[in-house]
Image: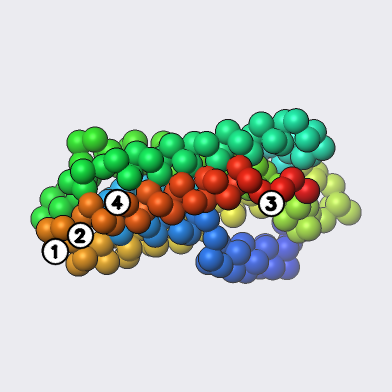
Amino acid sequence: MLLTPEQLAGFTMAAILITLSPGPDNLMVLSLGIARGKKQGIAFGLGCALGCISHTLLAAVGISALIAASPLAFTALKVGGGAYLVYLGVQALRSPGASFRPGTSGQGSANPARTMFAKGLLANAINPKVVLFFLAFLPQFVDTGRGMAGWQTLVLGLIFTLQAAVLFGLLGYFSGHVGQWLQRKPSMSKWLDRLAGSIFVALGLRLILARSH
């Protein structure tokens, strides 16, 4: 057996607590669910979760360590990731607020669910903070005495991705219901898009301006 029951139980509990703790991913899924509806909230949440697969693969083969050790590579990734979040925020700020209305399918023609999934996937995959998190978090649960450290890291990362997909999907679903209730007021849609856009811009600028450690 690649992982012991103790490894599996300890890691799963820690992963759930980390995923549930307030953070940028939760905030983005929550704001998009409220502003765009449950389908797009779920899609973006699933994209964020599945983006963890790329970090798992990088951590398993040691590339994340190389990125973390190179100030130039880390800074470039940090600026690129932050700029992409700002871009998503500006798009939401410029939205006319018609992307979601009660009684519709929950996805507008300009931003279908599959597009939001791709945006969530990319937003997570190019976030250097997540690169460092996986590099620091996954090895803590690897039992080097059992060998196959790379495979253990891969399995742990996939478990993290699975539980994140479930939790982010639920967050997108319930926040979409909240958004549907709020958008019964005709003028609310535009302001919810502006709120979501402001959150994305703030998170992007925070990432760009954050000090490298």
Is residue 93 among the parts visible in the rendering? yes
Nearest the camera: 140 or 100?
100
Sequence-first disc among 4 and 1: 1
Which residue occupies the extreme right position in the image?
145
List x then y, in percent, for residue 47: 44, 44
**Residue designated by label 3:** 133
**Which label number is shown at residue 176?**
none
Residue type at numbered disc 2: Met
Residue located 72% across and 55% down the image: 137
Is there CB contact under 8 Å for labels 3 and 1?
no
Sequence-first disc among 2 and 4: 2
Q: Secondary structure at mark 2?
A: helix
**Which label number is shown at residue 184?**
1
Gap between marks 3 and 2 measured at Cα = 36 Å
Q: Residues within 10 Å of mark 2 (few under 14, many from 20)?
A: some
The residue mark sitting in front, 4 or 1, is 4
Q: Quadrant of residue 110?
A: top left
Nearest the camera: 174 or 68?
68
Q: Is residue 60 above or below residue 194?
A: above
